[in-house]
Amino acid sequence: MRKAIIPAAGLGTRFLPATKAMPKEMLPLIDRPAIQYVVEEAVRAGLTDIVMITGRNKRALEDHFDREPFLEQSLANKGDLSKLAAVQKSSMLADIHYLRQGDPLGLGHAVLKARKHIGNEPFAVLLGDDLLDEQDEILNEMADVQRLTGGSVVALMEVHPSEISAYGCADATQTAGKHLRIKGLVEKPNPSTAPSNLAVIGRYVLHPRIFDILAETPPGRGGEIQLTDALQTLAVAEGPGSGVYGVVFRGRRFDTGDKLSYLKAIFTLALEHVDLGPGIREWLDESLLPVP
Ligand code: G1P
């Protein structure tokens, strides 16, 4: 597997007005935009052919992953080699292609847009808001399960039952292996009727048969074409490429599309940062001292 789709066409309304003129994917986490962490995760899993699905006001994404000759020259002239390397790195990470979604018809529609580029091979989808621990190798595990089963694979995470209405939810059973077999999927269910507390998080390894199904999937929750609905069809289908499986993620995840989770991500990364860690820890210790 070499190809990945990164949908990045969302409007980022939760961060307005910061995202009025800037894509939400460019919000920084320390010194890298959030989207770069996701591209780096794809590259670590060997996915170096990336299709980013964008829309209006997303030009900064293309600029970020492009060369910037004047800036590079100026840093080289100053002898600032570490910044030069950092600037060059984002343009050399992967082969990134850009497609505009056009109509904002949902995640399923965004994935379908990349059909011609992906062709007839399994591929990954990484949602830009989900920031996973750099140490975790869930995509590799999911690719193994895809090879083993010949179906499609989603990443799952146990959440508090009250939170399930923010996610796709899976009805799953254990298999003999480490993965789960998914019997059903429902997008953003009411907690009282949700089949489980297993949430779909933003990593998928999909069989290309999903494209035929997406093309036939009617708008679902929120009037959008839902990837979850297409996966539900695939879960109960027969024949080649059918079947949906789950790998449970137990590591650290932040939803950088949510303000509180975004802040937690920044503090966590800062605490682990070699230069910033000691300073932020000291400041936090002082700030958290009980008021005398
Ligand atoms: C999307 C998917 C949902 C999934 C979630 C993970 O929802 O539709 O099934 O659980 O991502 O982050 P969104 O967060 O875009 O509303």
Image: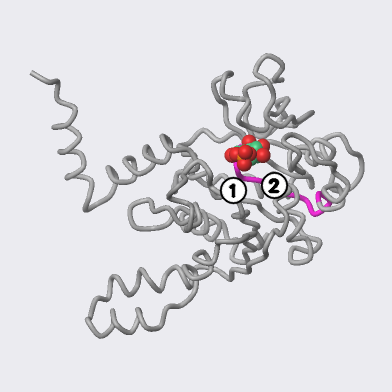
Quadrant containing ligand 1: top right
- Give the numbered dot on residue 107: 2
* Nearest the eye: 289 or 179: 289
Q: Which mark is residue 127?
A: 1
The quarter in which the N terminus is drawn is: bottom right
- Residue 26's place in the image compared with 130, above or below, is below
Would residue 38 be found to the left or right of residue 167 on screen? left
Per the image, label 1 sits on a secondary structure element best described as loop
Q: Mark 2 or mark 1, which has the lower sequence index?
A: 2
Find the distance from the CA under tag 2 to the CA under tag 1.
Answer: 9 Å
- Pick whichever, 81 or 74, lies toward us: 74
Q: Could you say where residue 46 lies in the image, as x and y percent from the top left?
A: 58, 61
Q: Which segment did they paint magenta?
A: 201-210
Instruction: Work out which quarter of the rendered image holds the C terminus and state it.
Output: top left
**For residue 256, above or below residue 95:** above
- Kindly tell me whether residue 155 is visible in this rendering: no
Q: Residue 245 at x, y = what percent?
A: 73, 37
Cβ(mark 2) to ligand 1 < 8 Å?
A: yes
**Does mark 1 have its CB less than 8 Å from ligand 1?**
yes
Three-letter code, disc 1 = Leu
Q: Residue furthest left?
A: 292
Front residue of 5/226: it is 226
Would you say residue 249 sits in the magenta stretch? no
Q: Is residue 199 at least partly visible in the picture? A: yes
- Mark identifier at residue 1: none
Q: How is the image coloured?
A: one colour
Asked whether disc 2 touches disc 1, contact meaning CB atoms under 8 Å apart, the reply is yes
Q: How would you classify the magenta stretch by its main secondary structure? A: strand
